[in-house]
Every structure is written in C-alpha cells, then in structure tokens.
Amino acid sequence: SSSSSSSTDYPDEGMGGRDGAAAGFALVRPPGHHVLAARPMGFGLLNTVSLAARYVQAKHQMQRVLIFDFDVHHGNGTMEAFYDDPSVLYVSTHQVNDASEAEE
C-alpha cells in the first residue's frame, strides 16, 4: 500500500488478498501509540496500530498479533489497550532519559 493508505488497507491486501498470506508485516507511521481509550494524547486522536490489530483479529481471524513499537517514547496507549490481552504481544523499545525512569 502507499504511505497514504489507512491502517486497514495493508491487512486486507496482505491477509488473503493477492497471495492468501497467513502472516504479514506492516511498518506504519504514525501509530497513535500514546492515545488512550478515553483520552487523546501525543497529538493523536486514534490509536491506529491498536485498531489495525483488532481489525485483523476480527476480519481475518488472526489468533495472535505482535506489535513491535520502536520509538523514542513509550507507547503507553497501545500498552494499556492490550495489557490484559494474551492474544496481543506488545513490545516497546524506547529511550530512557535517566536512571529513575529505568526503575519504573
């Protein structure tokens, strides 16, 4: 998909579209990873990566989803969305500014 595509374009194309793939990879920006369920944050209104994960689970019956978030900031919204959901593994790599943050 082009860079202007929505978060659901890739799953539709990659999951049974052209080649019937059972797995896929999408590099997306911006992820909206700071947006909480009840509150926009980080200049975002929608957590697009969370929406895409739920979309592939619902439409393409994906039992497991991995979200690997690499950014300078922690994706608190995405973590919150899937914290108690064993069907989604959320991994975040982000910058830690000082030792006190590393302990949190």
Image (cartoon, helix red, strand yellow):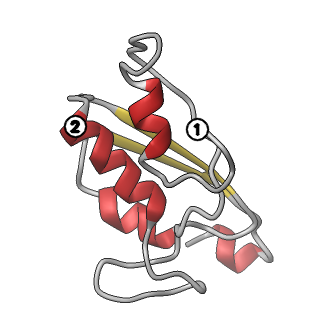
Q: Residue at x 36, y 57 (%)?
A: 51
Q: Quadrant of the C terminus?
A: bottom right
Residue topped by disc 2: 59
Identify which amino acid the numbered label 1 is placed on: Ala
Q: Which residue is mark 1?
A: 26
Residue for point 46% across, 62% down: 48
Precedes in sequence: disc 2 or disc 1: 1
Point out residue 63 in the picture as x, y percentages from the top left corner.
24, 28
The label shown at residue 93 is none
* Front one among 72 and 47: 47
Which residue is situated farthest in the top direction here?
Answer: 19
Report which quarter residue 12 is drawn in: top left
What amino acid is labelled 2 in the image? Answer: Lys
Spot occupied by residue 29 in the image (x, y as percentages of width and height): 66, 58
Work out how far the residue at label 2 is from the one at label 1, CA to CA, in angstroms.
Answer: 17 Å
Q: To which quarter of the image does residue 72 belong?
A: bottom right
Residue at the (53%, 69%) spot, across then down = 32
Vertical position of residue 41 compared to residue 10: above or below? below
Looking at the image, which is closer to me, 100 or 10?
10
Image-based side of 72 in relation to 21, left or right? right
Left or right relative to 28: residue 89:
left
Q: Dividing the image into 4 quarters, which one contains the N terminus? A: top right
Q: Tell me: 48 left or right of 97.
A: left
Location of residue 23 by image quarter: top left
Residue in front for this viewpoint, 99 or 42: 42
At which x and y percent is residue 74?
A: 61, 67
